[in-house]
Image (spheres, rainbow, N blue to C red):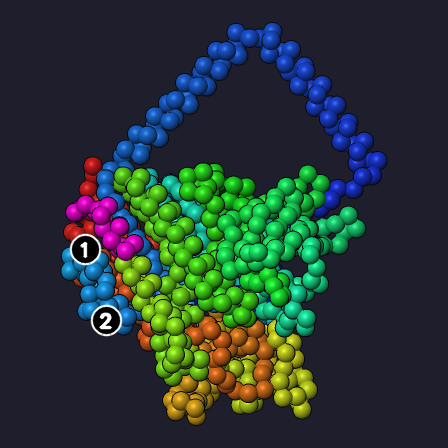
């Protein structure tokens, strides 16, 4: 999983504005006269209707009994239909994001993953081919649908509009103030729901807004924070010099005093004058010296923070218009009370008791979980890696944050696991991916940020999280019977990220991209300084190259057809010869043409070329945003030091199963058709559904899992 707020300025690029459509009603006399007239008419109508009911009491009692009888028959019919589904077993799927086969296999040999080893011995273990590109939203979309990005429509974190060259995030799609599904193909849960098989989906990426299923769904990656971004923290500090601009947070300088007044920043809405502005909630911080801390006061709340400790969840309510409120929850971490005041406030999550947008199905499920388990992260990517990159938080509070999110997810999984009688249960754990992103520098001696005298717990951090996943698996093993199915998989592997590659700078050097100022050594983000009348190709996202093609791009200059294909071939050949002088190895493992990795109704939206980097190299933060830096490459000096954005054959995931896998070289695309076969779909039906994968074992093995109760 790659967290987009760690690569782009979300307030510029990733803002999806959940407050769109919030307006303050004007107080004009004409409007109020209309409202009063409408109210009077309604009261008169209901009064006449009530008098009519009293005169026809017997008739309406009989009508009510008939309606209740019909409802009873319909309910009984539904129960009978559910009984006819006949699926009496459990299918449990655990999604562990980013587990590396190399680490898993070594730790199994060393006896450090006993439950992984047990499942391998009882059933099967294999490498699992990931998607191309190997990005988490792409991979988990392929897992859920069994189809490639050209069909389901998710192919990168960042996409462009060729009509105007504007960039946007792909994780969420809000139009007119309402979220729309990003995934354009059906997940396997739709098919299980069609057969009335109880289905529970917990945190699967790209499930915002949630689908209506025969069971329960809690949305995962893609759920924004209350600002509409993928995660914008706030940091308040009295440091004498204004801190550097944050890429994924709001940093506020405050003057130190015994009582400091600041503001929580909420969603945007249309104010009385028609201009959009952010809702704000003021709060006070009163400094305490013994022990060092602060008292926080806002709305009707007052609580104490101790320096170096996380708060529990706190709720806040924003006024965003007449009779309109938005509720959120957040956590505080007081970094320091003196000599400087430094307060971190997490991205404000939707309050699951009353979220602005649906984050679960049925809608009341999110609230039910609070009643059973307490408040929890609702933001799709809750772990604030960028705050660590920018040194607002150190590793210690970050680890505590990851542990808290893990405990919440574990409680959720256990809650559903304990009440699972039959049907399908999927649960997603993103923590191992995040930990590897941030701690890989401690296990790679060649990384620019490697520390020989590191804290021992940091050097073993990655292994410790693999052990945590082993414990989760052990719990699941205790809840299955012989005829149940347990699948454990990771969407891709992991490795080191040492060098950041500026693809647009390379295109400029090779003459494929030209800046407006021929003498300029660099160009700004968002493709802002490019001379489109002379540019043949440009890069955005994490490996995508687009041809500036006539009839497609607004200012395209390359003819479609033979000229485009010839240009693509030229770029591919030159990229393959690109070598890094520092590490003395090729930068590029493979370059793929669109038609080789994307096919389907949405393939035309995908990049013309996609770069498969060698391990150690990755498209830079600047490349993702269409920037053209001065140099071609630089050392990765951010704590985000591990990655999976390499050529997919270099970083496969893993799959373990308590059934024998007979298919050679299984891939993520095989999981969805495997599940459908286990719940009773025939080979003929599977062929008609357009999957890019096929079941992992033969039909007889599947039939043993789909027997009636």
Residue interval drawn in magenta: 471-487
Quadrant that contains the N terminus: bottom left
Image coords of residue 403 (percent x, y)? 40, 57
- Looking at the image, which residue is at 57% across and 50% down? 304
Task: Please determine whether, in this image, residue 547 is positioned above or below residue 250.
Answer: below
Check disc 2: other Cα within 10 Å, few if <14, some if 14-19, many if 20+.
few
- Secondary element at tag 2: helix
In three-dimensional space, the C-alpha distance between marks 1 and 2, rounded to whole angstroms, equals 23 Å
Check disc 1: other Cα within 10 Å, few if <14, some if 14-19, many if 20+.
many
Looking at the image, how many numbered discs can be counted on the residues?
Answer: 2
Image coords of residue 613 (percent x, y)? 41, 79
- Looking at the image, which residue is at 40% across and 71% down? 439
Image coords of residue 369 (percent x, y)? 43, 41
- Looking at the image, which residue is at 18% across and 58% down? 118
**Magenta stretch containing residue 191, yes or no?**
no
Question: In the rendered image, which residue does mark 2 sit on?
Answer: 106
Q: Nearer the viewer, residue 473 or 572?
A: 473
Question: In the rendered image, which residue does mark 1 sit on?
Answer: 659
Dividing the picture into quadrants, the one containing residue 124 is bottom left
Q: Is residue 605 visible?
A: no
Q: Is residue 442 visible?
A: yes
Q: Earlier in the sequence, mark 1 or mark 2?
A: 2
Image coords of residue 668 (percent x, y)? 32, 62
Task: Please determine whether, in this image, residue 460 is positioned above or below residue 22.
Answer: below
- Secondary element at tag 1: loop
Direction front: furthest residue: 290
Q: Nearer the viewer, residue 29 or 261?
A: 261
Left or right of 504 on screen, residue 429: left
């Amino acid at each position: 999983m790659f967290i987009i707020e760690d690569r782009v300025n979300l307030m510029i690029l990733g803002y999806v504005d959940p407050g769109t459509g919030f307006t303050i009603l004007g107080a004009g006399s004409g409007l109020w006269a209309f409202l009063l007239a409408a109210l009077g008419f309604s009261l008169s109508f209901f009064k006449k209707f009530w008098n009519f009911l009293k005169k026809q009491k017997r008739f309406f009692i009989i009508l009510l009994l008939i309606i209740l009888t019909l409802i009873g028959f319909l309910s009984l019919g539904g129960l009978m239909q559910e009984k006819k589904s006949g699926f009496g077993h459990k299918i449990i799927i655990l999604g562990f994001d980013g587990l590396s086969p190399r680490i898993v296999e070594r730790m199994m040999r060393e006896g450090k993953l006993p439950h992984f080893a047990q499942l391998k011995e009882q059933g099967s273990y294999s490498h699992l081919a990931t998607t191309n590109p190997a990005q988490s939203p792409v991979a988990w979309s392929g897992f859920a649908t069994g189809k490639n990005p050209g069909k389901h429509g998710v192919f990168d974190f960042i996409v462009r509009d060729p009509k105007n060259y504007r960039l946007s995030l792909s994780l969420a799609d809000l139009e007119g103030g309402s979220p729309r599904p990003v995934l354009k193909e059906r997940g396997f849960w739709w098919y299980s729901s069609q057969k009335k098989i109880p289905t529970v989906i917990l945190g699967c990426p790209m499930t915002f807004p949630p689908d209506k299923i025969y069971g329960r769904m809690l949305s995962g990656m893609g759920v924004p924070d209350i600002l509409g971004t993928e995660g914008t923290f706030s940091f308040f500090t009295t440091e004498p010099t204004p801190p550097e601009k944050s890429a994924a947070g709001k940093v506020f300088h405050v003057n130190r005093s015994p009582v400091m007044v600041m503001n929580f920043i909420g969603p945007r809405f249309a104010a009385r004058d028609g201009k959009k502005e952010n809702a704000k909630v003021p709060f006070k911080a009163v400094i305490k010296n013994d022990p060092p801390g602060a008292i926080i006061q806002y709305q009707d709340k007052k609580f104490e923070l101790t320096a170096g400790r996380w708060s529990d969840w706190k709720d806040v309510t924003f006024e965003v218009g007449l009779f309109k409120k938005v509720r959120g929850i957040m956590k505080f971490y007081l970094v320091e009370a003196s000599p400087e005041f430094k307060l971190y406030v997490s991205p404000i999550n939707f309050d699951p008791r009353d979220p602005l947008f649906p984050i679960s199905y049925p809608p009341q499920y999110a609230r039910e979980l609070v009643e059973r388990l307490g408040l929890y992260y609702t933001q799709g990517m809750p772990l604030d890696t960028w705050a660590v990159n920018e040194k607002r938080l150190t590793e210690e509070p970050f680890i505590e944050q990851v542990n808290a999110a893990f405990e919440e997810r574990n409680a959720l999984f256990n809650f559903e696991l304990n009440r699972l009688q039959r049907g399908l249960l999927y649960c997603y754990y993103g923590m191992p991916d995040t930990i590897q992103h941030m701690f890989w520098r401690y296990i790679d001696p060649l990384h620019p940020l490697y520390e020989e005298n590191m804290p021992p717990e940091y050097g073993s951090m990655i292994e410790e999280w693999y052990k945590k996943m082993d414990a989760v698996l052990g719990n699941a093993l205790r809840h299955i019977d012989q005829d149940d199915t347990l699948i454990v998989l990771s969407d891709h592997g992991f490795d080191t990220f040492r060098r950041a590659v500026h693809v647009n700078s390379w295109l400029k050097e090779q003459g494929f991209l030209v800046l407006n100022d021929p003498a300029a050594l660099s160009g700004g983000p968002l493709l802002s300084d490019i001379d489109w009348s002379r540019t043949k190709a440009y890069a955005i996202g994490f490996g995508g190259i687009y041809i500036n093609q006539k009839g497609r791009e607004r200012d395209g200059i390359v003819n479609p057809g033979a000229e485009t294909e010839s240009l693509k071939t030229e770029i591919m050949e030159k990229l393959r010869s690109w070598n890094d002088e520092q590490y003395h190895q090729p930068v590029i493992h493979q370059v793929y043409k669109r038609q080789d990795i994307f096919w389907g109704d949405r393939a035309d939206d995908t990049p013309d070329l996609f770069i498969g980097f060698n391990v150690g190299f990755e498209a830079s933060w600047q490349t993702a945003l269409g920037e053209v830096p001065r140099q071609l490459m630089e050392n990765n000096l951010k704590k985000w030091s591990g990655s999976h954005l390499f050529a997919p054959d270099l970083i496969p995931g893993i799959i373990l199963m308590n059934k024998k896998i007979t298919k050679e070289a299984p891939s993520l695309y095989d999981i969805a058709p495997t599940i459908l076969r286990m719940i009773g779909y025939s080979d003929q039906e599977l062929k008609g559904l357009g999957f890019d994968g096929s079941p992992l074992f033969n039909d007889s093995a599947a039939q043993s899992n789909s027997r009636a109760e």
